[in-house]
Amino acid sequence: MLVAVAEDVFKALADPTRRRILDELVERDGQTLFEICARLVSKHGIGLSRQAIGQHVAVLESAGLVRSRRQGRYKFHDIDTEPLEHIAARWLRPDAPEGTP
Amino acid sequence: MLVAVAEDVFKALADPTRRRILDELVERDGQTLFEICARLVSKHGIGLSRQAIGQHVAVLESAGLVRSRRQGRYKFHDIDTEPLEHIAARWLRPDAPEGTP
DNA sequence: TTGATAGGAAAGCCGTCACTTTCCTATGCT
DNA sequence: AGCATAGGAAAGTGACGGCTTTCCTATCAA
């Protein structure tokens, strides 16, 4: 979760719902889990349980794509685009490929 | 295979072996399936069957990341980085997210 | 034509993943 | 204290993905 391994980033991006969550956080940073759920169902018709969305968010956090800050009983989520800037460049430049498989 | 859907591109990139194949094709374009197999095993210790590698290459082709040209009994594979240039930009710019989930 | 080489197709096995369900903890309000 | 809200943990299920195995087609060389 601290170091973003390429493996985790690619696996995190492999799921459509997780990509939608990133879309939501790009549009509006600092949302709670319940807000994310509400917007996913209202804007994209994704009718998953709160627990399912929570698991998706956890995967995004482990991949370093989402950072969270706890505040009382709320937990706000922010997108971190830093891992995204390297992944595609691996094949776009004719350089040496980076470490993690 | 003609139009690269985001779904296919992300799923194709989710597997470590497929990313290694792209690494190989970046380093040396126009390899046959047997060449790819040989280099994967010799350089990365990936000891998969030819059929398994063939399936991986097929996934990459369906995602638009690899183009192939048949020549006699040989089939040469070339990388196509075009789909890679859009996927990360979806979240890097604060624009509207693109169409495909 | 025979045999070797390059590649493809399909069935089956097994592990991983996404999701639900149920239960549990923690904070805030009254 | 009591209850509602926000979130987390864990087990179970069903489906999908990766890989092997077996068999088949096409090209080239002898």
Image (tube, coloured by chain):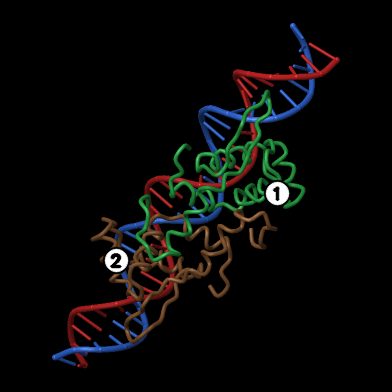
Chain colours: A brown, B green, C blue, D red
Q: Residue at x 29, y 66 (%)?
A: A37
The residue that appears at 53% across and 53% down in the rendered structure is B14
Distance from disc 1 to disc 2, alpha carbons, whole Å, reads 43 Å
Residue D4's spot in the image, x, y percent?
19, 79
Whether residues under marks 1 and 2 lie with C-beta atoms below 8 angstroms apart, the answer is no
Kind of residue sitting beneath label 1: Glu
User: The disc numbered 2 marks a residue on which chain?
Assistant: A
- Residue A32: percent from the left, percent from the top? 32, 75
Q: Quadrant of residue A98?
A: bottom right
Q: Which residue is mark 2?
A: A37
The residue nearer to you, when weighing B84 against B39, is B84
Seen in the picture, residue D28 relative to A86 is either above or below; the reply is above
Residue name at image x 33 percent, y 74 percent: A31
Q: Is residue A101 above or below residue B27?
A: below
Q: Nearer the viewer, mark 1 or mark 2?
A: 1
Q: Quadrant of the C terminus of chain A?
A: bottom right
Compared with C22, D21 (above or below) is above
**What residue appears at the point 66 percent right and 34 percent down from the top-left corner?**
B76
The local secondary structure at tag 2 comes to: helix
Amino acid type, mark 2:
Cys
Dot 1 lies on which element?
A: helix
User: How many labels, in total?
Assistant: 2
The answer to whether residue A92 is left or right of residue A39 is: right
Residue B51: x and y in percent read 63, 36
Label 1: how many Cα within 10 Å (few below 14, some 14–19, many 20+): some
The chain under label 1 reads B
In the rendered view, does A91 fall on the left or right side of A28?
Answer: right
Q: Point out which mark residue A26 bears.
A: none
Q: Which residue is mark 1?
A: B27
Question: How many neighbours does mark 2 have within 10 angstroms: few (below 14), some (14-19), or many (20 or more)?
Answer: many
